[in-house]
Amino acid sequence: MRIGVREAAFSVNCFAAAMLALVVSFRLGLDRPFWAMATVYITSQPLSGAVRSKAVFRLIGTIVGASATVVLVPLLVNAPVLLSLALALWVAGCQFVSLLDRTPRSYLFMLAGYTAAIVGFPSVTHPEAIFQVAVLRAQEIGIGVTCAAVIHAVFWPRSVTTLLRTRLQAVLDEAESWIADSLAPEKLARTDAKRRRLAADVTELHVMATHVPFDTATQRPTKAVLAALQDRFVLLIPLVSAVEDRIRSVAAIDAIPAPVAALVDDVRRWSRAPDSATPAALAARCEALSADQPMRTWADLLIVNLLDRLGELVTALDTTRHVAAQVTAPDAPMPEHVRSLLRERQRRPLHRDYALALLSAVATAIAILGCCAFWIVTSWPEGAVAAMIAAVVCCFFATMDDPVPAQRGFLIWTAVSLPLTALYLFALLPLVHSFEMLALVLAPALLISGALLALPHWYGRMMPMILGLAGGLALTNTFSADAVGFFNGGIAQLIGVAAAILATRLFRSLGAGTGIRRLRRAGWRELADLASRPSSLAIATWRSRMFDRVGLLAARVGDIDRADRDVGMAALRELRVGMNVAQLAPERVGDTPEIAALRSDIAAYFRTCAIEGAAVPAPTLRVRIDAAIASAIDLPISESRSNELIALTGLRRNFFPHAPAWETQKEAA
């Protein structure tokens, strides 16, 4: 743990914004100034653009959620069970939509959900004041987010765009280094580590990119450019692995022909030094060598496949560099192929896991209803706090594969905040008689917590600590220390978090390995459909969702054990399988009986995987591929024949990487 100048500056900004929010709320005579103070810390991020994005979505979500309570509470206040059910369903429904949205806008839906719980449950005993409470909540949140956005933008702002450009260059350098290592004549041990690091870096870039539209920089890259850049990096992962596999496969059978070896070496040099060659010249050499290469033996097929993938790699890396240049200089001239890529990217659908989103919503509803049932049966005055906290904690961590560890940490640090809150409430605050003294008394706890909040591995600990302190102090214009209320409120908070943990554990908890398998099952179902009914529209939709899934998979590969990591790498290869299947579409290679039968077998295999889990392809599938290769080899030389053989070779390597080399029946005899 190291607190530097940036962390200290961030903490000072947070404290200044919190005190500004408090003094504004006090001067306006608002009833719950602590809501504004807590909002400052929830909204604040080390990057100024991230603060502004959270501020906008938080304010809109708060207004929507508060409006929902104005409708529900007066209507159902005389039916506690129905009101509990309505609020629980509202929170769960908003969370469901939030998890399906998968854009920065999802924060709006999440806020709309748990704001209804924060405003609605405590207002049950005073339904006549619900409109006033809802307006007050929106006012306090508006004050908090405005203060946070202004202070972080004016004093020591950190631009998301500037940091993104610096990080992007580092990631591009890492990708180029990994490509160069993968194209080395001998396999290097460090290539696997570099591949996993690239996957993690792409995820980091994605998180940073979500805040760029709200950044303070005058020149910002567009959302389409950032999304296309992530796609390009994701595409490189399986593509480079495929090229590396073909190099090793050819070398295992026979020496790589000198012209091909020279081309691989030139591409390797170009990947580290872009000025050493032009991508157009390298791609032309790939096409020329592929056209001159005979396609009669398995070694021939592997070489042609290698040249095809190598040409794809050159194009992909060149496009990645051009898109990255648009991030660095948004006003620079844009090549037409990049412009076309951006137009295509804007229309792409993303992966959505409806079942997992539904399970998350069910867990949230069960946690809230459990707290409400305990509240109604026992008539415990602080039961509303438990239901409210359960909703908040379920929503906070819903995007994680397994939210329970983070929720458990939230429980621990909420408990840790209680003694500190008691110290302030019963020993220090009674001595305070002015706002200046209040700020001085709060400074030590908030400044230290704020500095730790800027450290990623401390964020999950300090946030419940600060929220527990702000909520426990409940600062208003009139101070009163109620020991019984504080004790009951603390117990209610812990019960609410515990209810969230229990419901999540029962209905929602998944490991990263399970998340990978769910993503793969979704991919298998779409691969089966693609093989059954290949069409231009189906291929475009599949490519979009598969790109997205590969990105989601890549983010998880570094966080799982060795066995699941191998599963994750296998999932990345399935992107190549789908592209091979797409190459066998009737409009590209015709609809011969051999290809139609092969597509049917591939569809049946992936349907089996989707139902029963990952399975070893049956030997009959290899026989079918071998028969299709034998049939295609006898066709007249044409572009269609080359595409078919390249695709079939890729399928054989991806499905049966350890199978003996393909042989014609004559050679086998």
Image: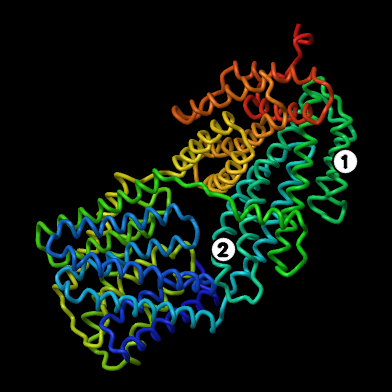
SS under mark 1: helix
Distance between the alpha carbons at the discs numbered 2 and 1: 38 Å
From the viewer's perspective, tell me whether residue 399 is left or right of residue 225. left
* Mark 2 closeness class: few <14, some 14–19, many ≥20 residues within 10 Å: some
Asked if 277 appears above or below 292 in the picture, the reply is: below
Image quadrant for the C terminus? top right
Residue 663 locus on image (x, y percent):
75, 15
Q: Which residue is mark 1?
A: 285
Identify which amino acid the numbered label 2 is placed on: Met
Depth check, mark 2 against mark 1: the one in front is 1
Q: Residue at x 54, y 49 (%)?
A: 349
Image label count: 2
**Residue closer to the observer: 20 or 565:** 20
Residue 119 locus on image (x, y percent):
26, 70
Q: Which residue is mark 2?
A: 208
Residue 599 locus on image (x, y percent):
61, 25
Identify which amino acid the numbered label 1 is placed on: Arg
From the viewer's perspective, tell me whether residue 390 is left or right of residue 628. left
Asked if 562 appears above or below 366 in the picture, the reply is: above
